[in-house]
Amino acid sequence: MNTPVRAAAEKELMYYRRMCNELGKDLQRVQDESERLVREVRRYQLQTRLERELSHVTGTASDIASMAPLVLDAVIEHSLCARAMILCERADHAGCFDILAAAGCRDMYVKSSVTLEEAPAFGHSFEGEHFPSNAPVFFKAVTKLTGSTQTIWNYDSGSGFAILLAGALGPADAIFRQQGDDLSHTALARLVDGYWRLRAQELLSEMTEIREEPSRVAATAPLTHDTKPELDKARPTIREYEIATSIAKGAVIEQVAVLIREDGEYELFVRPSWATGFRQMLTFRGHAEKVYKDFNRLLVFIRTACRYEGSIVLYAARSPQFEALKPATHISSLNERTSRTSTLESADGSDMPSLLGKRSGNADENRT
Amino acid sequence: MLLVFGGGKHTPEVIVETIAGVYPQSCVVGGACAGIIVTEGSSCSGSEIGMVAFMSPEFAPRTHYVDLLAHGDLEAGHQLGRLVREQHGSNAAVLVLYDSVLSFQPRRLHSAGLLLQGFQTEWPGGMAAMGGGLLTDLNLTDGWMLLNGAVRRHAALALVFPESVTADAIILRAARPISSFMSVTDIDGAEIYTLDGRRALDVVEGHLDAPLTDTAGHPSRIMTLGLKLGEQWEDGTPDDYVNRLIVTADRDKGSITLFEPDFYKGALVQLMQNDPAMMLDMAHNRVTKATTCGDGAGQPFLRLYIDCAGRASAMSGTLVEEADVVAAALPDDTPFLGFYSGVEIAPLCGRSRPLDWTGVLATYSVRG
C-alpha cells in the first residue's frame, strides 16, 4: 500500500475506533442510567418487602428475645451487609449496650455487651469518613466492634434499641451504602414498634388485673409532717391509667405526699385505697418518675386526675420521710428487670443479657 | 454422599457438626457460596444452605481433593489431575470446585486457569470438566471448603462421576463489547500494566464516567475485559468471548488486576458490559430450548446451576433474578440446586475454561 493511501486508511481506522469507543461509552452511559433506575425501583421493592416481613415478625413475636434474631434475619436477607447486630442500651447505664443478636460474625468474638459513648440517632462511617463527624470515639468503638470500616448505625433513644450494619469493601459495597441507611432505619422502626406492642400487651394484662374490684386496705393514721410514710414495697409505682380506672370502679386516693428535691422539682406519691402504702407516680410510658417544676400543675393533677381534695404533705430533701419514699423507682426497676430477665431466659434457655424494662430518665414527656 | 453449599455468614465447622449429627455416616463435601438458587427462588444473603444427597452408588461421585492451593495453583492442579487419573477413565464426568480467595488484603485470588491447566495436563478427561470457584460473598472476602467432613481453605475438589453418568452444559453469557480492540502491551500474570502502550487504569477509566476503584483499590463496579476467541474480525456474540473481571487496580502503578492470569502480551481485548435484558432473554431461551430438546442421552438425575455472583439482581441491575428465570424454564422435576460462584468452569471451544460473568447449567444424566 502506498504511503498516501495507507495514511488515509489509518486515519479512517482511527476515526472508526474513536466512533466505536464513543458509541460504547454512550451505550454504557445509557445502561448505567437504566441500571440506576432499576436499582431505585429495586430499593423500594426491597423496602416494601422488608416492611411486610418485619410487620409480620414484630406483630407475632412473643418477646424481644425471639423477635430480635428474626428481625436480624430479615435485615441480612435484604441489605447485602457482611455483619449485622441488634443492640439494646441498658436502662441503668447509658452508653452500655447489650448485643441481643448478631450475624456474620463467624471469624470474630462477639462480646455480650459493649460501651458506645455519644451514640448518635443515626450515623455511618465509610472508609474513615464519619457522619456525624463529631463522634470519633463512637465510630472508633463501632469499627472495633464490627471489624469493619463500613458501618451504618441507627438508634432509638426512647427504647434503647439500635441496629448496626457492617459492609465489606468490594463490588457490593456501593449497593450496601445505597440501601443500608433506609433498610436499617426501617428495621429499627419495626423493631421498636414490636417492642411497644409487647409493652402495651404487658400494660393490658396489668389493666385486666386493675379492672377487678380494688380491695380496700385500711389506711394508716392521717399523714402529717412527722409521720414516716410507708412505701408499698410490692408495687411501689403507679401510673395515671391505673388511678383513673380504679377511681372509676369506686376506689379513692386517700393520701398524697410530695417530695421536694434538692433541684427544686417535685415528685408525687399517692396512697390509693387498694394499696398497702405509698406509690410513686410514673410518666405515661413508665420510663421515669413523674417530676414537676411547677407546683400549680402538680396541684391541678392531684385535684382533677386523682380527685383528691385532702391535704397534701410536702417533705423536704434529706428528711427521714423523704428517704423512706425515695427508693420507690429503684425497687420498681429491680422488680421489672427481674421479671424481664426471667422472661428472656425462659424464651430460649440461654443466658441472654438483661433487657431494660424501664429507661431512666430525663426523657420525661410530662416534665414542665 | 452429601454435596453442601453454605452461605458466607455461616460458621463452616457448625455446618459440618450439624450435618454429621443428623447424617453420621455420610461423606460431606462442598464449600462456601455467595448465595443459593433453588426452584422456589434464590438468595444471596449469606445465610442459606443448599444440599444434594447422592443416595445411589449408580450415580454417586467419588471425591478427590488437594489443599495445597496456597503453595501454587498449577501444582495443585497437577496433583488433583494425578489423583483422578489413577482411579478413573478419561470419559468420566467431573465437577471441579475450588476455594477462590487467596487473601482479601491484599486482594488476591486463586487462579482457576492454572488449576485447570495442571489438571488437564495430567488427566485428558479434564477437558470437559465443569465447576466453579467458591467464595463467601459478593465482595470476594473469603472462602472455605468442606472436604470429607473437614473444613479447609485453599483447597480444590474433584467429584468424579461413574462412567455411566454423562454431563451436559448450557452456558449463559450476556457481555457485549463497548470499546474497540486494545492490545495488551505489558502484563505480568493477572496484572495488566499497559493497554496500547498507556497506563491500563487510565485507558479503562477513559471509558467510564466514574472511577473504577475506590481509594483502597477495591472495584466500585463490575467491569470486565473480553478476549475474543475464533476469528478476530468476524461478527461476534457473547459466546465468542472469554471475559475476565477486573478485581482490583493500583492507582500508583496504573495497573489493573484480572480474576485470572490467562491473558498475554499482544492479546487484543475489549472492555465488556453486561446487558441485563440479553441476560434474561438468553437464560429463558437457551434453557427452554436445550431442556425441551433433551439434554442428551439418558435420564437426568441432577441439574446444578453454577451462576456468577455478578449476575444476581443486586449486582446486575435487573428487577428479576436471572437464576429464577433459569429455574422457571426447567421443564421437569429433576432435582435442581444452584449456587452463586466467583468463577465458572465449563467447556468452551474444545476445552474447559474458567469463565467470568457466566451461568453454567450442568445436567447430569445416567446413560440410558
Image: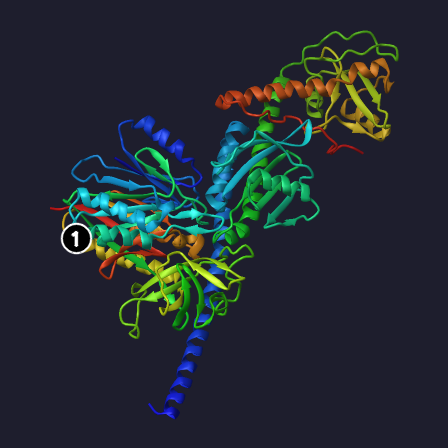
Residue toward you, A344 or B84: B84
Q: Residue at x 18, y 40 (%)?
A: B59
Of all residues, the one furthest to the left in this rendering is: B368
Residue toward you, B356 or A313: B356
Q: Amino acid at mark 1?
A: Gly
**Is residue B75 placed above or below A26 in the rendered structure?**
above
* Residue A364 visible to the viewer: yes
**Is residue B172 placed above or below A134 in the rendered structure?**
below
Residue A346 percent across, percent down from the top left: 51, 20
Residue A88 percent across, percent down from the top left: 61, 32
Q: Quadrant of the N terminus of chain A?
A: bottom left
Relative to A321, A6 lies left or right: left
Residue A175 percent across, percent down from the top left: 50, 52
Q: Residue at x 86, y 20 (%)?
A: A317
- Mark 1, residue position: B296
Q: Quadrant of residue A166?
A: top right
Q: Residue at x 28, y 59 (%)?
A: B285
Q: Quadrant of the C terminus of chain A?
A: top right
Relative to A59, A329 lies left or right: right
Secondary structure found at label 1: loop
* Residue A56 visible to the viewer: no
**Is residue A228 placed above or below B365 in the rendered structure?**
above
Pointer 1 local density, CA inside 10 Å: few below 14, some 14–19, many at least 20: some
